[in-house]
Each structure stands twice: as structure tokens, then as C-alpha cells.
């Protein structure tokens, strides 16, 4: 069963979709501060649809347009992440940039990391949800 267009992708799925090796995606994370996939326990990466769009733009700029890493960094600094995304979308870039998915990136400096308080509250919420799921699973197995 194929994943939907809004499903998160693992690093292997993202690499296959973009046509680049997994180690290239990990390398790009070190060079481009605006590439920040979600990381789960053990450092496992999950790429959101907007992450795939950014990676597609980076790939297009580096491989098709001939930009250097410093050139892409400068382009991001001067014109924002939406311009990087548009590079990967070609003709469909304008329509995508109007969609709410781009708003998830905030301003042109890239994604904002959660504050320590936000991270603590999110961790507590995740723990609560995990506990609730375990209780529900227990109830369902008794039936």
C-alpha cells in the first residue's frame, strides 16, 4: 500500500523519491540549516511533505542549476526558503507557494526550533498519549 501525499517519509523513502543516496540527505542537513526533518528516538528521521519540497529545491539548485553549496546558502539567506522550494517545483512553483504548507516554515530564516518549555510540554503530551494508547490496547485485547 503506497503512502499518501501528506504522509511522513523515512530517510530511505525520501532518498528514493528524490533520487539521491541517504548519506547525501544527512550531509545536506549539516550544510543547510533550513533542512530539519523530525527526529524520533535513536535519531530516526521523518521527512514531512514540506521537507521533501525543500530537499527537492536544494537538489534542483545543486544538480540542475549548477549552484554551489555556498550559493544555495546565500540564495536562502537573501530570498528565503520559498525560493528554494520554488526551484524544485519548476512551473508549479507559484501555485505551491500560495498553499498553507509553506506557512509552516515561518519567516525566510527557516524553521524555528521549539523553546525548551515547548519541548517539555510536547514530550509530556507524547508521554500522556503513549500511556493512553497502552491502556486502550490493553482494553481491546481483553475483549
Image (spheres, rainbow, N blue to C red):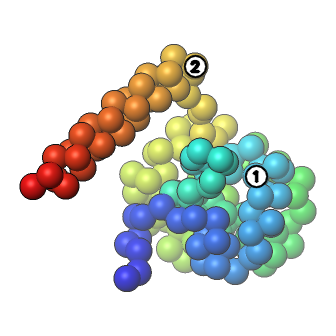
Marks 1 and 2 close (CB-CB < 8 Å): no
Q: Which mark is residue 116?
A: 2
Q: Residue furthest top?
A: 117
Secondary element under disc 2, as helix, strand or loop, is helix
| Residue 86 shows in this picture | no
For image coordinates 38% across by 72% down, the residue present is 4
Viewer-proximal residue among 32 and 77: 32
Relative to 26, 34 lies left or right: left
- Residue farthest toward the front in the current orientation of the protein: 142
Residue 85 placement, left or right of 26: left
Q: Is residue 122 above or below residue 25?
A: above
Q: Residues within 10 Å of mark 1 (few under 14, many from 20)?
A: some
Number of other residues with Cα within 10 Å of mark 2, as a class: few under 14, some 14 to 19, many 20 or more: few
- The quadrant of the picture occupied by the N terminus is bottom left
Viewer-closest of 115 and 34: 115
Q: Earlier in the sequence, mark 1 or mark 2?
A: 1
Quadrant showing the C terminus: bottom left
Rendered image: mark on residue 29: 1
| Left or right for 91, reference 74 | left
Pick whichever, 36 or 138, lies toward us.
138
Residue lying at the far left in this picture: please name it.
143
Query: What residue do we see at 48% from left, 61% from top?
Result: 8
Q: Whole-percent x and y of residue 56?
A: 65, 69
Local SS, label 1? helix
Above or below residue 137? Residue 54 is below
- In the rendered image, residue 90, in percent from the top left (x then y), is placed at 60, 75
Q: Which disc, if any, is residue 139?
A: none
Picture coordinates of residue 46, whole percent (x, y):
56, 56
Residue 133 horizontal/vertical position (percent): 28, 44
Circle count? 2
- Name the residue rendered at 51%, 57% in the picture: 48
Task: Judge by depth and name the residue closer to the eye, 116 or 111.
Answer: 116
Amino acid at each position: 500500500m503506497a503512502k499518501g501525499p501528506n504522509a511522513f517519509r523515512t530517510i530511505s523513502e525520501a532518498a528514493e523519491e528524490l533520487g539521491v543516496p541517504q548519506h547525501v540527505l544527512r550531509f545536506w542537513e549539516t550544510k543547510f540549516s533550513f533542512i530539519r526533518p523530525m527526529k524520533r528516538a535513536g535519531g530516526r528521521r521523518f521527512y514531512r511533505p514540506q521537507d521533501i519540497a525543500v530537499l527537492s529545491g536544494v537538489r534542483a539548485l545543486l544538480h540542475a542549476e549548477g549552484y554551489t553549496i555556498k550559493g544555495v546558502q546565500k540564495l536562502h539567506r537573501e530570498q528565503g526558503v520559498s525560493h528554494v522550494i520554488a526551484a524544485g517545483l519548476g512551473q508549479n512553483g507559484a501555485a505551491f507557494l500560495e498553499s498553507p504548507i509553506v506557512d509552516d516554515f515561518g519567516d525566510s530564516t527557516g524553521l524555528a526550533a521549539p523553546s525548551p518549555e515547548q519541548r517539555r510540554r510536547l514530550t509530556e503530551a507524547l508521554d500522556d498519549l503513549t500511556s493512553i494508547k497502552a491502556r486502550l490496547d490493553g482494553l481491546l485485547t481483553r475483549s
